[in-house]
Image (cartoon, rainbow, N blue to C red):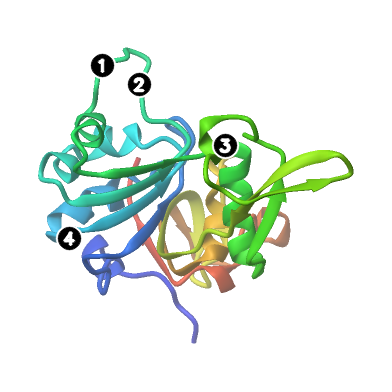
Amino acid sequence: MINKVVRDIAQAMAGVTSGASIMIGGFGNAGIPAALIRTLSDNDLDNLTLIINAIRRVDECEPVLFAEQRVSHVISTSFRGPDALPSNFERQWIEGRVSLEIQPQGTFAERIRAGGAGIAAFYTPTAVGTPLVEGRELREFDGETCVLETALTADVALLRAQKADRFGNLFFQGTQANFGAAMATAAALTIVEVEEISDEPLPPEQVHLPGIYVQRVVQVSR
């Protein structure tokens, strides 16, 4: 019988190793898997690649990850908070101790979607004429210059949803969905923290992400 619900976070994160590439869902405070992020430092993981919309959310959830230099590479669309004070990550990036690949948000989302769809690369006009595309392959389509972007995949995706059933089907509450569904398709292992676990299969109209893309679900209170 299929049952993707695990007893605790330790079991959910079993097998996640140093050197892993990890996609982390979330937009603002919506859909941030804070409990799973904290476990990355609890398990003494290092040399991590983090793929997340706003890297400062990791510093907010678990400052140890950057304070102890557990992360070697970041792919993100934003890294500075509203107070404009340098974070642990930003200081390490300035000092050359962690590398950063900054992306326009639409390109970031499309690279992940392409990874899940098995599309190796695509061309987009976004960011052409800016430092973000220096040294990259450019090509003209119907008179418009585009840059080649490669797909993004990862070893692990960490997500948060409102509800799941034992099959791993997920229901996201509002904007909690954000990048979650795309990341789940682009990762080899998807781990989800949820507030509720349904004893019965979720009704079809509530399934925002089918369980085929989810390997482990753990219940974590708000």
**Separation of residues labelled 3 and 4 (CA atoms):** 27 Å
Q: Upstream in the sequence, badge 1 or badge 3?
A: 1
Residue that mark 4 sits on: 45
Residue at coordinates 10% horizontally, 45% vertically from top-left?
Answer: 68
Rendering quarter of residue 64: top left
**Separation of residues labelled 2 and 1 (CA atoms):** 7 Å
Q: Give the left or right position of residue 148, taking residue 167 as reference.
A: right
Q: Give the left or right position of residue 194, taking residue 176 as reference.
A: left
Q: Residues within 10 Å of mark 3 (few under 14, many from 20)?
A: some
Which of 43/125 is in front? 125
The extreme front residue here reads 135
Residue 30 placement (x, y as % from top left): 47, 35
Residue 185, visible in the rendered structure: yes
Residue at coordinates 42% horizontally, 35% vertically from top-left?
Answer: 54
Q: Are marks 1 and 3 in contact (CB under 8 Å)?
A: no
Q: Give the left or right position of residue 6, taking residue 208 as reference.
A: left
Residue 83 placement (x, y as % from top left): 32, 12
Q: Upstream in the sequence, badge 3 or badge 4?
A: 4
Q: If the image is split into quadrants, where does the C terminus sit?
A: top left
Q: Upstream in the sequence, badge 2 or badge 4?
A: 4
Which of 166/200 is in front? 166
Residue that mark 2 sits on: 81
Q: Indicate which disc residue 105 carries.
A: 3
Residue that mark 1 sits on: 85
Q: Are marks 2 and 1 in contact (CB under 8 Å)?
A: yes
**Separation of residues labelled 3 and 2 (CA atoms):** 16 Å
Q: Upstream in the sequence, badge 4 or badge 1?
A: 4
The extreme bottom residue here reads 1
Residue at coordinates 49% horizontally, 82% vertically from top-left?
Answer: 2
